[in-house]
Image (cartoon, grey):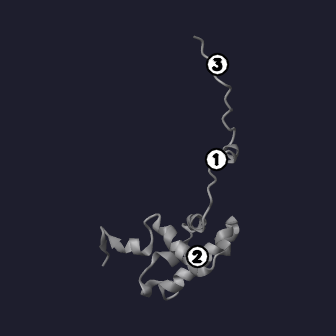
Amino acid sequence: MRHKPPAPSRALPATVADLEAQRIVKRSVTLLDETERALLALYDDPQFRAYRGIDDPDMTVEGSTVVDDVMATQMIREKALELDLPLVKAANLTELSLKLRRAESRFNASRNQRRKVGGEAAS
């Protein structure tokens, strides 16, 4: 009994762009995904870290964590203009601030997560 020769196969896509063009299930980017991208782009910025790094009101840049959060969120929005992140550019500051905290929590780096030491609340 003779086997049929295999059907010719398609060549492997030549570039990443070609590979992405062949994606069967299209991935939709969310506001949280775009916020994370802006967070990572700003992470090494000393001013951004000053706004996000302190949770003691006596040591905050603007006198309260709430105002520091707004300032950091504004920086996220400005970075979105540079990076052309349409969902972040269109979001209001309240929604964007919530997404910023959620994006930080993806890295175990939110203020609440940093307050915990070994599963216990930090003193």
- Which residue carries the number 1 mark? 24
Task: Decide: few, some or many residues near mark 2? Use Cα within 10 Å; few <14, some 14-19, many ≥20.
Answer: many
Which one is in front, 82 or 26? Answer: 26
The three-letter code of the residue at mark 2 reads Leu
Q: Quadrant of residue 31?
A: bottom right
Q: CA distance from mark 1 to mark 3?
A: 28 Å
The three-letter code of the residue at mark 3 reads Pro
Q: How many marks?
A: 3
- Expressed as whole percent of the image width and height from the top left, the position of residue 106 reads 47, 64
Q: Earlier in the sequence, mark 1 or mark 3?
A: 3
The three-letter code of the residue at mark 1 reads Ile
In the visual, does 105 lie left or right of 115?
right
The residue mark sitting in front, 1 or 2, is 1
* Disc on res. 60: none
Q: Look at the image and tell me in which quarter the N terminus lies.
A: top right
- Expressed as whole percent of the image width and height from the top left, the position of residue 53 reads 47, 75
In the visual, does 89 lie left or right of 73?
right
- Expressed as whole percent of the image width and height from the top left, the position of residue 120 reads 29, 72
Q: CA distance from mark 2 to mark 3?
A: 57 Å
* Disc on res. 96: 2
- Expressed as whole percent of the image width and height from the top left, the position of residue 101 reads 50, 73
Element under disc 3: loop
Element under disc 2: helix
Task: Decide: few, some or many residues near mark 1? Use Cα within 10 Å; few <14, some 14-19, many ≥20.
Answer: few
- Which residue carries the number 3 mark? 5
Q: Earlier in the sequence, mark 2 or mark 3?
A: 3
Tag 1 near tag 2, CB within 8 Å: no
Q: Quadrant of residue 109?
A: bottom left
The residue mark sitting in front, 2 or 3, is 3
In the visual, does 117 lie left or right of 36?
left
